């Protein structure tokens, strides 16, 4: 067994490079960032690798870390809830306070961002080819990016001494192709073939993802390599202590891209029924996440249904600290998804003391057993009853759910890396 501290490690930062132009991170972005920071901060020889159309480019530790931190700085995740204009606008709307003045990116900030992107591009173009990797390097790829372009990884055939570890986030395009973009199932199958060809190890965010991955690889003629499961780390911002949004009525949260598999459509139909029956006494629903794909029916309700408009709020670009403050003041998190690779909002909510109603899919039961209430994603009547019970003044149902969170400790990134490092050490 060769400890990571005594062997060269190259972490793939290709996806992070593409996120230099984005204002907020996705779930996969957070995993990428956590791995890049963790591996580049270790002792020993540490490198960054970017796949390009001209082949991989290898960067030294300093160059890779500079790009990683430039990406993180652009996400503005190190501020506070009070300095997040998206949070402040939302808090004003749901708390009845005066709205802050709208803010726009300054021209100087935009120019500075473009300059950072240009510098990163020059750094990458000046990187060394794959043959510059030291013998016996461990190559760690923690996003799905470019895996559907197998030629980008052909260099691994020439460097048989390099051991590759790939992180699998989900198999949703294969197990539930009806929820993806056209052609996504084929692309994801190609990603899994790339992993099957080159992986010496697979890292997974849940037992459910690990089992589905191994079953798929066996079904397509590959022998699965060793697999390590590490539940994703919850950021330190999520906790019971800290700012909390003041709300003027029961408020339920839904987190994630607005897309069919998240089952927003069920909730919006329930809210229409609530609004028609309760009028001004209708609880509020806050949808946290950008609009996604194949979501026309959901968007039609959001844009054209006047009945729900006073009671449903959309917000995107919310910072980690802003989301944590919102969770500390809300009534409950609703997670009625048909399928998930993990479901990080469940554990973020639990860490913040926010009760959770979730669909009873396997991964939700894996990460939320003991504190969630589980309801079938097709049981509209069950969801309606539970929501109404939680929204009652002095709700006994909410108090009982909140009590289940007493003593809960969410997984952190140190826990995740402690779970996966033994496998990486053993390669």
Image: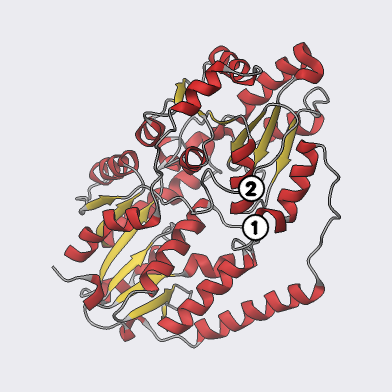
Location of residue 286 in the rendering, given as x and y in whole percent from the top left corner: 68, 35
Q: Residues within 10 Å of mark 1 (few under 14, many from 20)?
A: some
Q: Can you tell which quarter of the image residue 364 is in?
A: top left
Which residue occupies 55% across, 46% down?
241
- Asked if one can make out residue 196 in the rendered structure from this viewpoint, the answer is no
Q: Residue at x 60, y 69 (%)?
A: 73
**Which SS class for mark 2?**
loop
Q: Which residue is identified by label 1?
A: 80
404 displayed left or right of 238: left
Q: Quadrant of the C terminus?
A: bottom left
Q: Quadrant of residue 61?
A: bottom left
Residue at 31% over, 54% down: 203
Question: Which of label 2 and label 1 is nearer to you?
Answer: 2
What secondary structure is marked by label 1? Answer: loop
Give whichever of 187, 33 is nearer the camera: 33
Q: Nearer the viewer, residue 279 or 24?
A: 279
Q: Are marks 2 and 1 in contact (CB under 8 Å)?
A: yes
Q: Earlier in the sequence, mark 2 or mark 1?
A: 1
The residue indicated by pointer 2 is 243
214 lies above or below 58 = above
The reply, left or right, for residue 1 in relation to residue 45 is left
């Amino acid at each position: 067994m060769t400890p990571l501290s005594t062997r060269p490690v190259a972490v793939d930062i290709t996806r992070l490079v593409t996120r230099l132009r984005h204002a907020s991170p996705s779930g996969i972005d957070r995993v990428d960032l956590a791995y890049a920071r963790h591996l580049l901060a270790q002792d020993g020889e540490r490198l960054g690798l970017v796949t390009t159309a001209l082949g991989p480019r290898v960067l030294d530790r300093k160059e890779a870390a500079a790009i990683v931190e430039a990406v993180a700085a652009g996400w503005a995740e190190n501020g506070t809830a009070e300095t997040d204009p998206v949070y402040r606008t939302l808090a004003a709307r749901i708390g009845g306070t005066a709205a802050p003045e709208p803010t726009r990116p300054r021209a100087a900030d935009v120019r500075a961002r473009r300059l950072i992107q240009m510098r990163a591009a020059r750094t990458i173009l000046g990187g060394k080819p794959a043959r510059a990797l030291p013998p016996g390097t461990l190559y760690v790829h923690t996003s799905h990016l470019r895996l559907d372009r197998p030629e980008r990884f052909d260099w691994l055939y020439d460097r048989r001494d390099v051991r590759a570890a790939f992180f699998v986030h989900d198999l949703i395009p294969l197990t539930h192709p009806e929820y993806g973009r056209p052609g996504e199932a084929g692309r994801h199958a190609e990603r899994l073939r790339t992993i099957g060809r080159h992986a010496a190890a697979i890292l997974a965010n849940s037992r459910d993802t690990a089992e589905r991955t191994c079953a798929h690889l066996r079904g397509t003629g590959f022998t699965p390599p060793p697999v390590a499961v590490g539940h994703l780390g919850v950021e330190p911002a999520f906790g019971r202590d800290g700012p909390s949004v003041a709300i003027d009525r029961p408020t339920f949260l839904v987190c994630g891209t607005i897309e069919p598999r998240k089952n927003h459509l069920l909730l919006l139909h329930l809210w229409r029924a609530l609004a028609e029956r309760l009028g001004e006494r209708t609880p509020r629903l806050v949808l946290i996440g950008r609009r996604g794909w194949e979501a026309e029916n959901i968007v039609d309700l959001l844009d054209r249904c006047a009945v729900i408009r006073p009671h449903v709020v959309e917000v995107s670009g919310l910072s980690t600290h802003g989301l944590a403050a919102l969770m500390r003041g809300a009534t409950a998190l609703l997670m009625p998804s048909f399928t998930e690779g993990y479901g990080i909002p469940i554990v973020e909510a639990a860490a913040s003391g926010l009760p959770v109603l979730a669909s009873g899919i396997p991964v939700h039961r894996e990460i939320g057993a003991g504190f969630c209430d589980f309801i079938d994603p097709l049981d509209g009547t069950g969801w309606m009853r539970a929501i109404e019970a939680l929204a009652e003044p002095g709700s006994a149902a909410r108090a009982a759910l909140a009590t289940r969170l007493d003593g809960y400790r969410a997984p952190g990134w140190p826990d995740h890396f402690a779970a996966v490092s033994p496998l990486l050490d053993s390669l």
